Image: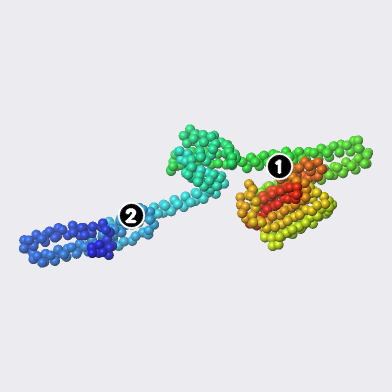
Amino acid sequence: MFEKARKALGFEKNSQFATKVLVLSFPTALVFVILAAAKLVDPLLAIISMASVVMFNIILLFPLTIQLQQIKKYITSIASGEKIEEISLHISETEAKDIVDAVNAMHHFWAQKTFDLEAQTISDTAVLDSLPDPIMMIDRNGNILGANLSARNNFGNDITEKCIDRVFGSNNFIRAVNKVLSQESNSENLVFYLPAPADKKLYAHIKSLPWISKGKAVAVISVYDLTKSLKIEKMQSDFVANASHELRTPLSVISGFIETLQTSAKDDPDAQEKFLSIMSEQAKYMSDLIENLLSLSRIELNQEQPPENIITDLSEIVNDVAQALNLKANSRNMNIELSCDNNLPQIVGDRAQIKQVIHNLTDNATKYGLSDTNITITVKNVDKIPSSPNIKETDIPAVAISVNNKGPKIDADKLARLTERFYRLQEHKDLSIKGTGLGLAIAKHIVLRHRGNLTVVSNNLNGTTFTVYLPVRY
């Protein structure tokens, strides 16, 4: 019965309300007992008076006890981190009001502080995640406490659960980190290599945090990947060397014939006609070479910027290329055959560049295919793009454009080099087939810009087939 009454009145189990009432009523009850015992007060009147005092104490203590329980519950909720609204109590006592106001003020102050801290943390995290280079914070033992998005993408999402020496297997780098952690040095800068499979050359800046910084982090590490820069630098160096070498030969030929025409062949019309024809060919070769070099440079300049235009007429592009090269193919008794799927999907691409790719592949087919054979251009839908180190996503629908010629088989070790700048098969050089060695390099870079893939297959039965895969979506 008492338990039901306690729950009905809203008292806590350990509130000891009855004990408090009895203790408060005890002095008055004792007085009435003494008066009744001394027969100075009628016993019935004493009992009624005692009951009145107890009832008065109950009425007095009931609201105060309820309010104190609410304050206790409110403060306990705040201490446990629960999100609750501020309480508003109707308390008559000034001290109780002051307690409630102070608690509400404290709750509001720390709630605002927490909100500001969370907002600042989110903002700082967003800034760090937007940086392109990996950044990590480490404690005194070399454990990684935090890492931005670039670091997590490059070294694993679980990087914050590892020690720095488990992420970077470079002794030089670990020694540099230990020097900063042991306070032998305030900062360290070094270039180091990551072994296979990463195979990267990295630049690292390790900096100790100032003593006023709070928290467990004692140093910050920023890493910059030099691999791509060094690759571009080497590519540019090789490009200049190869271009200089390729231009030197026709220039030497032209210079030699000019000297001959100015001296021994000065009055020889037959020699002049022959030499001028050769000079014209060499001048055209240089013109084609320079044009291809400029085209390749423009493509590489926009390599990281995928095109945004919608192309809906791939079959029309293929037809245009076939018509443009049909006369050249007929001169070798070759026919260009087309096969296109119906309802080809739209792709996102640069129309001029895609046309250049198909033109380069078809032009090579007319030059290197056997006479009296056919060149086949096939355009069809495929479920996905073949995997490649340069492609991040392959399980997407694509359009495949294949150009086949019935030329001699190309060995596997040579197939891998076909898209290198200035690379030409020795067999083609022996046959005096003209070319700059840049057509396939241009095609490869255009396909990479479109986030596609270029494959080549060659055998004795079906000749050589180049296939360009262009994604329907990115």
| Quadrant holding the C terminus | bottom right
The circle drawn on residue 11 is none
| Quadrant holding the N terminus | bottom left
Residue at horizontal 75%, vertical 52%?
404
Q: Is residue 174 above or below residue 66?
A: above
For mark 2, what is the residue? 76
Residue 238 visible in the snapshot: yes
Q: Is residue 394 left or right of residue 371?
A: left
Q: Are marks 2 and 1 in contact (CB under 8 Å)?
A: no
Choose top left, top right, bottom left or bottom right for residue 432: top right
* Nearest to viewer (mark 2 / mark 1): 1
Residue at horizontal 83%, vertical 52%?
372
Q: Is residue 382 above or below residue 408?
A: below
Residue at horizontal 64%, vertical 56%?
383
Q: Secondary structure at mark 2?
A: helix
Give the residue type that dot 1 points to: Asp
For mark 1, what is the residue? 413
Q: Secondary structure at mark 1?
A: helix
Residue at horizontal 48%, vertical 40%?
163
Residue 108 locus on image (x, y percent): 38, 55
Mark closest to the chain's N terminus, 2 or 1: 2
Q: Is residue 232 left or right of residue 332?
A: left
In the displayed orientation, state which residue is furthest to the top.
Answer: 184
| Mark 1 Cα-neighbour bin, 10 Å: few <14, some 14–19, many ≥20 | few
| Mark 2 Cα-neighbour bin, 10 Å: few <14, some 14–19, many ≥20 | few
Residue 366 locus on image (x, y percent): 79, 50
Residue 289 locus on image (x, y percent): 77, 45
Give the residue type that dot 2 points to: Thr
Q: How is the image coloured?
A: rainbow
Query: What's the distance in space between the residues labelled 2 and 1, CA to CA?
Result: 75 Å
Q: Is residue 237 above or below residue 55?
A: above
